[in-house]
Image (cartoon, rainbow, N blue to C red):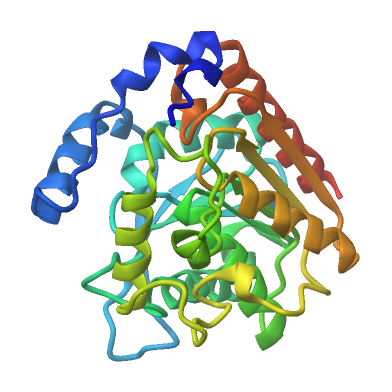
Amino acid sequence: MTSRHLIDPELALAVELFPPLSFGSTPLAEVRRQLDEMTSSAAQHSGQIVKVDCVRDPQGPPVPVHVFGPANRQGRLPAVLHIHGGGYVLGSPTMVAAANEKLASALGCAIFSVDYRLAPETRHPGALEDCYAVLKWLHAEADSLGIDRDRIGVMGESAGAGLAAALALLARDRGEAAIAFQHLIQPMLDDRTCTLADDHPYAGEFVWTREHNRFGWTSLLGTAPGRGDVPPYAAAARAVDLSGLPPAFISVGTLDLFFEENLEYARRLTRAGVPVELHVYPGAYHGFELIAGASVSSRALRDSEEALRRSMSV
């Protein structure tokens, strides 16, 4: 059953611009190389790269962090710990570097984008611990970094948003470094989506499919998704208790594979007393906000930026 007739007209032709992912027939290293080549033009930026010692794993490698900030700094800046997407198996901070540089300038904030270790070479909890190490570093070094430790939030797209949601859970439970807000764009939250008997008939046909989702989750977990022993720090939707989490922004398109799991997470957050701002975009598939010129993409980017501005002003 196709969902093509449901795509926003301005997004319909653009869906062909997304290169097909073929994890089964193409070596993962080659898929990564192709993605790096495709996004190389977006990697031009003036951000700095620092390396943070991974405090949870003294034997592990330092975590590279790409740092962006406004040209004219005034006082202590709010900060965003950014986590890139890529299904837990692809991507790097460079593919969204230009966007992060622009956003830091527009909002007058500092953005720290984590180059976390990818699956399947590194299984859960490696990527999450990389992100947590950077969060603790931001708190510990806030004075020297010129940031306001009371206004440190997390943001991510897709798998990066899934890691951001998991990081919010981990930070709450460890009680060592507070997070002011969680900004989740099309978050990849629930491994059980791979195993639904009654899955959404019109979601997940384009860009990120059910087959891709199974590959991503299997790579991260090291086992088949949907098992009963998957921890909530791997798949945030598995968490039983969502109380005490920071305010959440969640955005998703109606044709996104993650549409229903995102709505359910938003619903559960509100029932746990967590402030939630939810945006749903009709006729939009996964990654649609990358389509420059489409009205729905411009609206999504504007909604996201305005929500971040509000979060940082608290």
How many numbered marks does the figure carry?
Answer: 0
Q: Residue at x 37, y 88 (%)?
A: 57
Where, quadrant-wise, is the N terminus in this rendering? top left
Residue located at (60% from left, 33% from top): 253
> Left or right: where does residue 287 sit relative to residue 237?
left
Q: Is residue 197 visible?
A: yes
Q: Position of residue 281 (x, y in %)?
A: 66, 28
Which picture quadrant has residue 242? bottom right
Q: Image quarter for residue 46?
A: top left
User: Which residue occupies 58% across, 78% down?
Assistant: 232
Near-viewer residue (164 or 87): 87
Q: Position of residue 213 (x, y in %)?
A: 38, 55
Q: Is residue 68 above or below residue 152?
A: above
Task: Say if residue 63 shows up in the picture.
Answer: no
Q: Foreground: 230 or 233?
A: 230
Residue 298 position in % (x across, y down): 60, 18
Q: Looking at the picture, does residue 102 appear above or below residue 178?
A: above
> In the picture shown, does residue 240 fall above or below 45?
below
State the residue in front, 261 or 137: 261
Residue 125: x percent and y percent? 42, 80
Left or right: 218 with respect to 80?
Answer: left
Report the side of 21 relative to 33 (left or right).
Answer: right
Residue at 52% in and 9% down: 9
